Image (cartoon, rainbow, N blue to C red):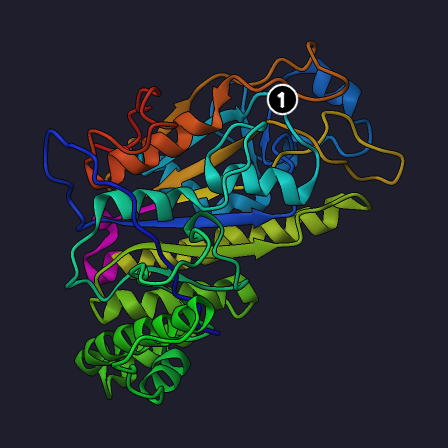
């Protein structure tokens, strides 16, 4: 599936030119990841009281400091923590949280307030204002679920230039299909909808040509093919391998979105959550090792996000229900590792929910400003000071 998109808004006045040599890799933990069993407050008596069944024993944890530990399924990520290449940003949420999957992810994708309806994603709005260089292979690539999320465009309008965002099931399949598309029509279409379709095809064809040229750099490299085949063979691992192919081809891309689904763990959470975290960690560890081999690890900023966390207490089905605040990971060669923010107070809940201490908008503003060296981003994000995630 190929889904380019786009719209334009006025440029922002910047004090310094952006740097587009870094790639932001956004990883959606679809369904709402349970933060308390990801970053575990193992010494907190309230944690044990809230989770008599789901509370993880100490021997299933990897200690990060005197009060917090990772689920042992995340062990492949520990080397990043030890190298100072992993930040754990705690207790992220937003005011007046919404427990609906669909509405809450809309709020995250738009970086909006919960009382606003913004019909486009924050990356799409930002790139419309900043206009990354045209010579890049693509502005954004989406792997996994064909949902643009933060890259979602504004409603299509006739005559509006498309952003170079594309969805790929695999790099080779996308390129083959894109190169087979008909040449763009020279005359304008009769309707805005048809014009949008033709613009979509034109962007897909242009990106396919650029990526095809990139792939020629690695054509016939059997050692590379074996290396990519060694990535984990679950769905998330395969997405990481496809992204790795673009890294090996030296494709210039500003943002990539991957998705890892199944985190809506209402029932029998323990086994499912361990598997999902293990797949996440294995995929990211493989991607890091590959990026280091290619000499590009310092140019990558990998950040997780999810529509919400889970409730503080377990439910009667050995699972957890839709909640609010949760921690997220930021990884990369230039990331400043360590704990950022404060852990939620499990003795002070709001209707059974954790109370966030770090605004989601500040997290997103930090990713945008620090990844691309922006002094300004979007009006909704600029009031928030960066977290100091990247050196």
Q: Is residue 128 left or right of residue 312?
A: left
Residue stretch in magenta: 292-302
Whole-percent x and y of residue 174? 39, 78
Whole-percent x and y of residue 369? 26, 33
Q: Is residue 229 left or right of residue 38?
A: left
Quadrant of image for the C terminus: top left
Label 1 CA crowd tier, 10 Å (few <14, some 14–19, many 20+): few
Q: Residue at x 55, y 36 (%)?
A: 117
Residue 55's place in the image compared with 270, above or below, is: above
Observer-nearest of 17 and 249: 17
Q: Is residue 79 visible?
A: no
Residue farthest to the front? 190
Q: Residue at x 79, y 19 (%)?
A: 49
Observer-nearest of 56 and 295: 295
Residue 62's place in the image compared with 223, above or below, is: above
Could you tell me which secondary element the residue under label 1 belongs to? loop
């Amino acid at each position: 599936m190929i889904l380019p998109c786009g719209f334009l808004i006025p440029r922002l006045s910047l004090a310094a030119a952006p740097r587009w040599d870094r790639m932001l890799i956004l990883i959606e933990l679809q369904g709402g990841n349970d933060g308390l069993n990801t970053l575990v407050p193992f010494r907190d008596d309230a944690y044990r009281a809230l989770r008599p069944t789901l509370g993880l024993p100490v021997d299933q944890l990897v200690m990060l400091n005197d009060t917090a530990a990772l689920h042992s399924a995340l062990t492949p990520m520990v080397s990043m923590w030890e190298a100072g290449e992993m930040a754990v940003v705690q207790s992220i949420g937003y005011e007046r949280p919404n427990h609906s999957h669909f509405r809450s992810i809309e709020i995250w994708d738009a970086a909006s307030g919960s009382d606003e309806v913004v019909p486009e994603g924050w990356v799409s709005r930002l790139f419309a204002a900043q206009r990354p260089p045209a010579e890049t292979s693509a502005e954004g690539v989406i792997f996994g679920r064909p949902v643009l999320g933060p890259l979602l465009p504004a409603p299509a309008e006739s005559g509006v230039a498309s952003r170079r965002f594309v969805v790929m099931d695999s790099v080779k399949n996308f390129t083959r299909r894109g190169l087979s598309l008909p040449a763009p029509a020279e005359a304008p279409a009769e309707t805005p909808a048809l014009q949008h379709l033709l613009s979509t095809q034109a962007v897909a064809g242009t990106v396919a040509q650029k990526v095809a040229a990139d792939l020629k750099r690695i054509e016939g490299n059997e050692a590379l093919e074996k290396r990519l085949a060694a990535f984990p063979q679950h769905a998330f691992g395969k997405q990481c391998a496809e992204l790795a192919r673009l890294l090996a081809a030296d494709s210039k891309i500003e943002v990539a979105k991957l998705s890892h689904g199944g985190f809506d763990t209402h029932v029998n959470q323990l086994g499912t959550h361990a598997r999902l975290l293990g797949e996440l960690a294995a995929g990211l560890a493989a991607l890091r090792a590959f990026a280091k081999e290619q000499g590009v690890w310092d140019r990558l900023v990998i950040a997780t996000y999810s529509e919400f966390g889970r409730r503080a207490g377990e439910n009667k089905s050995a699972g957890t229900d839709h909640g609010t605040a949760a921690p997220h990971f930021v990884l990369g060669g230039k990331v400043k590792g360590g704990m950022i923010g404060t852990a939620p107070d499990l003795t002070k809940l709001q209707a059974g929910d954790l109370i966030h201490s770090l605004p989601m908008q500040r997290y997103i503003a930090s990713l945008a400003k620090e990844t691309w060296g922006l002094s300004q981003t979007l009006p909704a994000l600029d009031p928030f000071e960066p977290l100091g995630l990247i050196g």
